[in-house]
Image: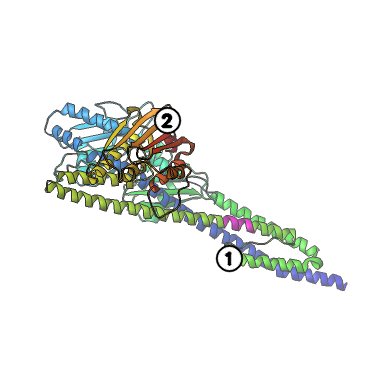
């Protein structure tokens, strides 16, 4: 009887001292997990919004570059001036149309380019209509031509016009948004010449918004959409909701989020009623990016976890009561150990893990589930930190790209005008070439361009080298027309050209000659750079071919070595380089690039 009484008392004492702490531990774990998951979802959502904003700004900047090429083009200014003066209107309109058509496919999603002149004339190229008289969007944009012209020409800023439905073509509705800028005549900055408007397919915005859409760590289905400063939908996951007025933008952020939530629930894009909304406002565009997410899966996952913890706890108590005499010491030690690790985790030590040793099966289950939860949590926090680091790097690079190049270009432009005022036209040409070279090289230095663009840049670069070296060498560039639109990475050819000028012609008697040729060889682009300089030492040539150049302070061949490394990284087996050189005779560099590899990379 005493033994039974002791066992009963021991079981009772164990139940009193174990059930309550375990219940509290389960509740604490559940609510703590809920808080951590919710915090993680909030942080990841904000990172998603900020990354979407960065992507949106990068894409908009790229289309503003196309706009810049048009409104600063002297030939466009001349033709529009003639149209304003009533001279050769039909001829100039056709020439402008041809010029716009040439720029049309430099960027995807451009559907129309339209010029409104100060003399109330119109010249455009429209992809949707392919017509010379019918514009696909003008009548449905919400503004008259006079209102558009007045709005865009009043300042030197880029104006954004929200998404509106254009005319229907091929049985499909097309929705366009527009960016516009006044045409600038740098000879008379105040003169009103006209405005240029780019019409861009809304699908671009949709792809930017959905680029990061996927089921995240918390199991939440989500998507992004955009609303303009008037509260109208600019981009959405389906066309039927575009242009709808969904919110009064004068409301405070909380009230706007409630309005967005009601709108998302009405569209039935997300299943369930557990919808949360987050917003990010872009001051530059005047647009608000909205992230809608359904957290029903996260709630369901947490409820399942709670039931699992409760079930494991009950089973543990039942088994522990049966084998209390045998396992009391071990169980007590195991419980204390698990509790201590969980306490560490509760203090924010994400590396806390339970080492699986000899312990009851129930405690092992708890330990495994806890370790899995901590692994998932730590992975989530790590990914969030990496996303924040990438965002910060992107913001810093964006700021540098906005400030330093613009300052440099503006300074060069000022010096250029000073040279023109002094009638130093050679100096002005050199400064203009330098500005072009810097803009090309600094902006998206790893971007993809056509061979024509790269050769045009090389011409500017070579003209500066000839001016610097007092025309001590001649250069002949011959590129077959079929090579012009082949796409390659920027600045791949320049290191080889620079090596020929700076090292091939050094300490040799003239006349110096540099020949650059380009042609198609089967499915390959073949570019050959030949000089009649002093040639390369056979040992150095062997080391370059074997990629075994010694690491020394000298930089004689570092440009060529880096260019060869870039080609291996970009193209793999889709690029080949052959270098032939003979002392006191010259060097020939031949480059083959698989013609379709550039498009795949892009």
Q: Residue 148: where, in percent of width, then height?
A: 22, 40
Looking at the picture, does residue 305 appear above or below residue 114?
Answer: below
- Colouring style: rainbow
Using the rendered view, name the quadrant where residue 528 is placed. top left
Let me know if residue 151 appears in the view. Answer: no
Residue at image point 22% right, 52% down = 411
Closest to the camera, between mark 2 and mark 1, is: 2
Residue at image point 63% right, 65% down = 341
Answer whether residue 374 is magenta in the image: yes
Q: Residue 284: where, in percent of width, then height?
A: 31, 50
Using the rendered view, name the quadrant where residue 197 is placed. top left
- Disc 2 target residue: 524
| Mark sitting on residue 346 | 1
Q: Residue 481: where, in percent of width, then height?
A: 32, 28
Mark 1 crowdedness (10 Å alpha carbons): few <14, some 14-19, many ≥20: some
Camera-side residue of 513 and 100: 513
**Range of residues picked out in magenta:** 370-377
Q: Is residue 218 left or right of residue 143?
A: right
Image quarter in which the N terminus is found: bottom right
Camera-side residue of 278 and 584: 584
Camera-side residue of 194 and 238: 194
Q: Residue 206: where, in percent of width, then height?
A: 41, 41
Answer whether residue 470 is magenta in the image: no
């Amino acid at each position: 009887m005493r033994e039974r009484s002791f066992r009963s008392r021991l079981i009772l004492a164990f139940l009193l001292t174990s059930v309550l702490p375990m219940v509290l531990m389960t509740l604490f774990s559940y609510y703590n997990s809920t808080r951590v998951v919710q915090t993680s979802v909030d942080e990841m959502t904000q990172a998603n919004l900020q990354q979407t904003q960065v992507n949106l700004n990068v894409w908009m900047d790229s289309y503003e570059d196309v706009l810049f090429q048009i409104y600063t083009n002297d030939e466009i200014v001349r033709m529009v001036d003639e149209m304003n003066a009533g001279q050769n209107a039909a001829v100039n309109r056709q020439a402008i149309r041809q010029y716009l058509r040439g720029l049309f496919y430099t960027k995807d999603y451009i559907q129309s380019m339209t010029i409104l002149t100060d003399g109330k004339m119109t010249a455009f190229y429209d992809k949707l209509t392919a017509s010379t008289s019918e514009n696909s969007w003008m009548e449905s944009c919400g503004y008259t031509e006079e209102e558009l012209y007045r709005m865009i020409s009043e300042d030197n800023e880029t104006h954004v016009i929200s998404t509106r439905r254009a005319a229907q073509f091929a049985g499909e509705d097309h929705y366009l948004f527009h960016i516009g800028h006044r045409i600038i005549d740098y000879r008379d900055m105040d003169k009103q010449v006209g405005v240029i408007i780019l019409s861009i397919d809304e699908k671009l915005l949709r792809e930017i918004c959905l680029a990061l859409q996927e089921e995240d760590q918390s199991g939440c289905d989500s998507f992004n959409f955009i609303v303009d400063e008037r509260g109208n939908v600019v981009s959405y996951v389906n066309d039927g909701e575009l242009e709808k007025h969904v919110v009064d933008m004068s409301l405070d952020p909380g009230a706007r989020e409630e309005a967005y939530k009601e709108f998302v629930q009405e569209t039935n894009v997300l299943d369930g009623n557990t919808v949360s909304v987050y917003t990010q406002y872009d001051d530059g565009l005047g647009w608000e990016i909205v992230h809608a997410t359904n957290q029903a899966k996260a709630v369901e996952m947490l409820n399942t976890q709670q039931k699992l913890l409760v079930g494991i706890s009950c089973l543990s108590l039942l088994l522990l009561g049966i084998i209390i005499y045998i396992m009391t010491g071990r169980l007590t030690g195991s419980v204390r150990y698990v509790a201590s690790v969980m306490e560490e985790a509760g203090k924010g030590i994400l590396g806390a893990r339970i080492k699986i040793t000899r312990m009851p099966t129930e405690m092992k289950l708890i330990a495994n589930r806890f370790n899995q939860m901590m692994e998932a949590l730590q992975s989530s926090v790590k990914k969030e930190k990496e996303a924040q680091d990438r965002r910060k790097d992107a913001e810093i690079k964006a700021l540098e790209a906005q400030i330093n190049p613009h300052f440099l270009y503006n300074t060069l432009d000022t010096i250029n005008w000073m040279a023109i005022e002094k009638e130093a036209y050679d100096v002005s040409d050199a400064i203009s070439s330098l500005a072009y070279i810097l803009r090309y090289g600094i902006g998206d230095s790893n971007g993809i361009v056509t061979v024509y663009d790269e050769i045009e840049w090389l011409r500017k670069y070579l003209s500066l080298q000839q001016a610097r070296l007092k025309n001590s060498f001649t250069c002949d560039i011959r590129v077959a027309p079929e090579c012009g639109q082949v796409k390659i990475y920027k600045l791949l050819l320049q290191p080889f050209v620079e090596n020929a000028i700076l090292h091939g012609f050094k300490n040799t008697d003239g006349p110096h000659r540099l020949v650059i040729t380009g042609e198609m060889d089967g499915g390959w682009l073949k570019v050959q750079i030949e000089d009649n300089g002093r040639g390369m030492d056979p040992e150095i040539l062997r080391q370059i071919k074997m990629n075994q150049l010694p690491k020394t302070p000298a930089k004689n061949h570092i440009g060529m070595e880096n260019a060869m490394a870039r080609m291996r990284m970009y193209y793999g087996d889709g690029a080949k380089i052959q270098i032939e050189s003979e002392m006191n005779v010259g060097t020939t560099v031949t480059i083959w690039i698989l013609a379709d590899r550039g498009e795949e990379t892009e």
